Image (tube, rainbow, N blue to C red):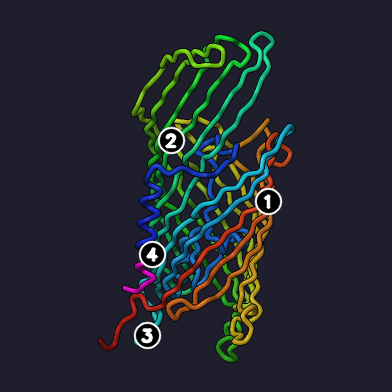
């Protein structure tokens, strides 16, 4: 077994153990108090640098998790691991706070089930291609610590604290096949996680008061699937065959994710605490129930996109997607959410991928813009996010194979015009390792 496969198996096992344990998100966002937390961007790092234009995008050596139809366009095994660091400045009308967080973003492995070199050695060309993929990626993050103060004419100052942590992850098994210029794919995913929400109320100006503490801890388990389709067309096929010029290619893609039915199991603890002159005098448990079974639904999603490719020189694309968050239901944490939308445009430019004496001419220079609405609302105003992204794909040799280090940065603003505004900058980094020797048919042993 090649070294890349051993690395993939080792890291996948390590992250699976990490995610299924009692690990908690280190995110810090007031928005994550609602629903199952902040939804995680379901794009590999190099695609985030292109604004998330994924529906119609296909790459021979990079993984597109968003549209499973793209897997069968791979010409080599690809293993992708990504990390990120995020800086946020969260502000309201009275104060602001600067926050940092970061984490391992995802692990992804995809490979063609028939090595392209085998077709060359057999001197047979098949119109069919098949590929398989495995992904492990966060699905949502919960992390907040909010304190608010109210002044009551009789009770004085009332302090309310809201604290939450946890999140959900998903493990995905994907398959894809293509016939000539048509590509089809499907992902089967398992969503799992643990979310904890706590709130407390204290009466600070009363010498003897009964403060209330409510703790809720619940797990989520559910299955979902999504389907993908892509179509590609070479516009100058005759010139490519006769003159060997670069391909001018257009592609269209569409994907749809099913609504996810999930089960929950909750533990609830509600206590009344007697506080006398600032010190806890007594505690009375009002509710202590474990193993409350419930259910819920996560939303379906659809997306479409178009791309234009000028050989290996550049590509540009546009994506539109809609997520039906109005379908959201959760017995463990009921919320009313709204459908969300996302529009993105982006691509890359590569000066000369064949350059031997200038490294920076072989680099991918990526760019993108995005705008989206959020399922959550404040004062009947739906939260909106907009931003720009930039990145570089740096080629390097690993195990005598060309691989890439992907560096990206995103700038954006979330919740502009609402009571809570967030400005953020996210730095992302990933390695994409490639190996073109999997499943090759050996002529001699």
Q: Are marks 3 and 4 in contact (CB under 8 Å)?
A: no
Sequence-wise, which precedes: disc 1 or disc 4? Answer: 4
Binning the other alpha carbons within 10 Å of mark 1 as few (below 14), some (14 to 19) or many (20 upward) gives some
Within 10 angstroms of label 2, few (less than 14), some, or many (20 or more) residues?
A: many
Q: For the residue labelled by badge 4, is the local secondary structure a helix, a strand or a loop?
A: helix
Q: CA distance from mark 2 to mark 4?
A: 33 Å
Query: As displayed, is residue 282 above or below residue 432?
Result: above
Q: Secondary structure at mark 3?
A: loop
Tell me whether the residue at label 2 lies in contact with that at label 4, contact meaning CB atoms closer than 8 angstroms.
Answer: no
Q: Label 1, label 4: how many angstroms apart (C-alpha)?
A: 33 Å
Mark carried by residue 412? 1
Q: Nearer the viewer, residue 213 or 175?
A: 213
Disc number lying in front (3 or 2)? 2
Report the span colored magenta.
1-7
Q: Nearer the viewer, mark 3 or mark 4?
A: 4
Residue at the spot of label 3: 124
Which residue does the numbered mark 4 point to in the structure image? 8
In the rendered view, would you say 439 is above or below 108? below
Specify the quadrant that holds the N terminus: bottom left
Residue drawn at 72 percent across, 42 percent down: 416
Quadrant in which residue 361 is drawn: bottom right
- Which mark sits nearer the N-terminus, 2 or 4? 4
Disc with the residue nearer the chain's start (3 vs 2): 3
């Amino acid at each position: 077994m090649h070294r890349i496969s051993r690395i993939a198996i080792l890291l996948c096992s390590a992250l699976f153990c990490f995610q299924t344990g009692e690990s908690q998100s280190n995110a810090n966002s007031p928005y994550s108090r609602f629903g199952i937390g902040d939804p995680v961007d379901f794009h590999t790092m190099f695609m985030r640098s292109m604004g998330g234009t994924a529906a119609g995008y296909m790459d021979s050596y990079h993984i597109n998790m968003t549209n499973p139809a793209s897997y069968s366009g791979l010409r080599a095994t690809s293993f992708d691991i990504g990390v990120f660091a995020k800086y946020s400045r969260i502000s309201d009308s009275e104060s602001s706070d600067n926050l940092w967080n970061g984490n391992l973003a995802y692990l992804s492995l995809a490979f063609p089930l028939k090595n392209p070199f085998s077709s060359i050695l057999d001197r047979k060309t098949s119109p069919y291609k098949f590929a398989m993929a495995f992904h492990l990626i966060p699905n949502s993050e919960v992390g907040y610590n909010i304190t608010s103060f109210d002044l009551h004419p009789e009770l004085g100052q009332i302090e309310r604290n809201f604290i939450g942590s946890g999140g959900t992850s998903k493990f995905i098994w994907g398959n894809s096949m293509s016939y000539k210029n048509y590509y089809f794919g499907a992902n089967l995913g398992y969503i799992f996680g643990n979310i904890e929400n706590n709130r407390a109320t204290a009466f600070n100006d009363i010498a003897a008061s009964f403060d209330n503490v409510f703790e809720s801890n619940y797990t989520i388990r559910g299955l979902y699937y999504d389907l993908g389709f892509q179509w590609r067309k070479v516009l100058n096929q005759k010139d490519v065959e006769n003159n060997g010029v670069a391909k001018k290619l257009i592609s269209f893609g569409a994907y749809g994710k099913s609504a996810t039915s999930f089960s929950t199991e909750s533990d609830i603890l509600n206590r009344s605490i007697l506080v006398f002159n600032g010190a806890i005098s007594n505690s009375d448990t009002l509710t202590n129930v474990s193993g409350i079974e419930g259910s819920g639904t996560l939303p379906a999603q659809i997306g479409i996109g178009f791309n234009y490719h000028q050989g290996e020189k550049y590509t540009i694309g546009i994506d539109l997607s809609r997520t039906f968050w109005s379908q959201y239901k959760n017995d463990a944490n009921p919320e009313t959410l709204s459908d969300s939308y996302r529009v993105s445009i982006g691509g890359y430019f590569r000066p000369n991928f064949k350059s031997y004496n200038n490294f920076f001419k072989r680099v991918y220079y990526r760019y993108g813009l995005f705008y989206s609405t959020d399922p959550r609302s404040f004062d009947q105003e739906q939260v909106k996010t907009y931003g720009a992204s930039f990145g570089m794909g740096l080629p390097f040799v690993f195990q005598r194979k060309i691989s890439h280090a992907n560096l990206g940065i995103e700038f954006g603003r979330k919740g502009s015009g609402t009571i809570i505004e967030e400005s953020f900058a996210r730095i992302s980094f990933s390695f994409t390792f490639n190996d073109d020797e999997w499943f090759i048919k050996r002529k001699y042993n």
